[in-house]
Amino acid sequence: MALSDSRARDHAVILAYVTAFAVATICHLFDIARGGWLPYTKYALGLNVFWTSLTFLDPLAIVLLLKRRRAGVCLALLIITVDVVVNDRGPFVDGRIADLSEAAARRIGMIADGVVEALLDILQIGSKP
């Protein structure tokens, strides 16, 4: 009985990974349909390429998880690890002191350039939450 419980748990974990990668693939496809190739323009080119490449890597992870479990788990863990590191870091670049949301950047007309020189007025000094 313990073996079948273990197998059921393994299948449930694989199903969860497959579902997550399928949803991620759909999200990346929508981003490309909406924003064109390399749609993540507010990020550096390397991050833009990485997230766009997930459109191909996520489905590959699904196939490998279903056909070659060990290779699928390795690719899935690699994708997740890199994604967490990249998402945790954000679009920050040396020399920049402020990052704007896409809406704020659009409002001041800096979308085309991506990076602009600006004068910042500190209205209030606060503490980090």
Image (tube, grey):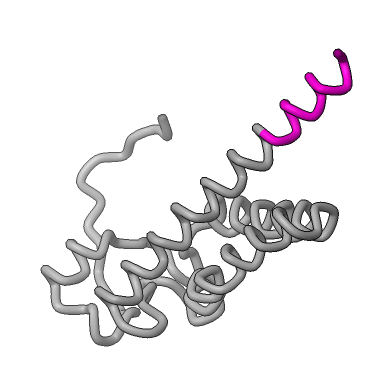
Q: Is residue 114 above or below residue 99?
A: below
Q: Which is the main secondary structure of the residues drawn in magenta?
A: helix
Image quadrant containing the N terminus: top right
Residue, x 50% and y 71% (percent of image)? 55
Res 94 visible? no
In the picture, measured across the screen, residue 35 lies left or right of residue 29, that is left
Residue, x 75% and y 59% (percent of image)? 67
Residue, x 52% and y 46% (percent of image)? 19
Residue, x 59% and y 39% (percent of image)? 16
In the picture, measured across the screen, residue 123 lies left or right of residue 15, that is left
Q: Is residue 98 above or below residue 118?
A: above
Q: Is residue 95 above or below residue 26?
A: below
Q: Which residues are magenta?
A: 1-11
In the picture, measured across the screen, residue 11 lies left or right of residue 107, that is right
Q: Position of residue 99 (x, y in %)?
A: 35, 62
Return the residue nearer the eye: 110 or 66.
66
